[in-house]
Image (cartoon, rainbow, N blue to C red):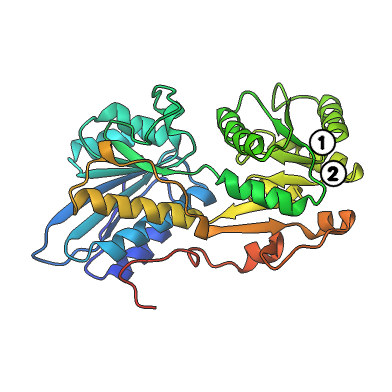
């Protein structure tokens, strides 16, 4: 891979624009900086696990947070996107060799690469639902949220309390919940456990319906969904589900059975009655604030609990065609999915520091 270095000088606004323009290019090194003379300088290496919209939006939040917070020091960010020519292992090796003071990773592979390369450099990670599983930490029910390693970060897991509240609002006669998932998808299993805990507390019966493989035949998938609809008053599909390729089929069967469906994220939400949007920018911004706390305030990642996504960056969505088919209407707290996603301004739900309103 040919690494092209873009040198960005002095002005924070200039740095941010250059950083966002370069973040999606896997064959460039983009250097952002808040640099002014006579200040302490921190070098931050950013390993982006893949080039996609979700990761790029997290990156935008992180770079914005760094520019907002590092006012009394210089923060130089070097961002590299992993691809077939430049693996996350290679990228993290480079950051270690360059003696960066901190690494920010986006995605599980990027975090594991960074962790395997250094146990000393602080690592702030994002786009990971279950840090315990990803880091092979003890399955302790009383886990305090700290990894006891050089890693901390922000979990991308949906807030299941809010998901359940949305489910109740979307299902006036909620009596039982059917959970559709693929056992190969560890993050789906993690979300299921979280949701099932809240369902148990609310006294709402639930049942899991497993698709043994994402490539299950359409006939088999159709039978599973039909059976789930016959036993459930609403179906739930976890965020980042491996069943994405089956969502059109799931929607068709559920709608014909007059059963509402709830999606854990806005991508699944294209095919469900309702879904929960969470602004990825906010996740990145929270990670940037963690980076500041580590570098400027002296906090140790070993004692910093994994943060949850802020509920203020959530939005309940519904799809108009599904709602019309079921004869459902929604309060103002819900937004029509297509209208919301085409007009929403990234980061507008995030409370920024040191920025005049």
Residue drawn at point x = 68 percent, y = 58 percent: 317
> From the viewer's perspective, is 149 left or right of 258?
left
Q: Secondary structure at mark 2?
A: loop
Quadrant holding the N terminus: top left
**Residue 219: x, y in percent?**
86, 26
> From the viewer's perspective, is 154 left or right of 171?
left
Q: What is the crowding at mark 2: few (fewer than 14 residues within 10 Å), some, or many (at least 20)? A: many
Residue drawn at point x = 52 percent, y = 47 percent: 52
Q: Secondary structure at mark 1?
A: loop
- Furthest-right residue in view? 256
Front position in the image: 118 or 320: 320
Residue drawn at point x = 41 percent, y = 39 percent: 82
Residue 114 can be seen, yes or no: yes
Number of numbered labels in the structure image: 2
Residue drawn at point x = 47 percent, y = 54 percent: 310
Q: Which mark is residue 232?
A: 1
Q: Which mark is residue 76?
A: none
> Mark 1 or mark 2: which comes first in sequence?
1
Where is residue 116, by image quadrant? top left
Where is residue 315, by image quadrant? bottom right
Where is residue 183, by image quadrant? top right
Quadrant holding the C terminus: bottom left
Residue that label 2 marks? 259
**Residue 343: x, y in percent?**
62, 69
Q: Are marks 1 and 2 in contact (CB under 8 Å)?
A: yes
Q: CA distance from mark 1 to mark 2?
A: 8 Å
């Amino acid at each position: 891979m040919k690494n092209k270095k873009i040198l960005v000088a002095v002005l924070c606004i200039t740095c941010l624009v250059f950083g966002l323009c370069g973040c999606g290019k896997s064959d460039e090194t983009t250097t952002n900086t808040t640099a002014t003379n006579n200040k302490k300088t921190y070098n931050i290496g950013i390993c982006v696990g893949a080039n996609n919209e979700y990761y790029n939006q997290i990156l935008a939040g992180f770079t914005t947070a760094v520019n907002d917070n590092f006012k009394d020091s210089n923060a130089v960010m070097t961002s590299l996107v992993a691809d077939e020519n430049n693996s996350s292992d290679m990228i993290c090796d480079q950051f270690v060799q360059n003696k960066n003071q901190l690494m920010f990773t986006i995605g599980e592979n990027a975090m594991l690469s960074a962790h395997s390369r250094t146990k000393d450099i602080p690592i702030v990670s994002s786009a990971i639902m279950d840090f315990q599983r990803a880091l092979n930490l003890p399955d302790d029910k009383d886990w305090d949220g700290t990894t006891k390693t050089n890693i901390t970060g922000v979990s991308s897991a949906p807030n299941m309390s809010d998901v359940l509240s949305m489910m109740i609002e979307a299902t006036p006669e909620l009596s039982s919940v059917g959970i559709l998932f693929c056992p190969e998808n560890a993050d789906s299993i993690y979300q299921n456990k979280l949701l099932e805990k809240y369902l148990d507390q609310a006294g709402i019966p639930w049942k899991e319906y497993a698709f043994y493989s994402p490539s299950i035949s359409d006939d088999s998938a159709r039978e599973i969904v039909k059976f789930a609809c016959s036993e459930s008053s609403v179906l739930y599909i976890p965020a980042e589900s491996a069943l994405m390729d089956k969502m059109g089929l799931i929607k068709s069967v559920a709608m014909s059975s007059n059963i509402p469906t709830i999606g854990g994220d806005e991508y699944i939400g294209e095919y469900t009655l309702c879904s929960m949007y969470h602004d990825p920018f906010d996740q990145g911004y929270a990670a940037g604030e963690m980076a500041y706390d580590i570098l400027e305030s002296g906090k140790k990642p070993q004692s910093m609990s994994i943060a949850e996504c802020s509920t203020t960056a959530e939005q309940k969505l519904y799809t108009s065609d599904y709602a019309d088919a079921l004869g459902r209407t929604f309060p103002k707290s819900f937004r029509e999915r297509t209208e919301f996603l085409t007009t929403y301004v990234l980061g507008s739900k995030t409370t920024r520091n040191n920025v005049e309103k």
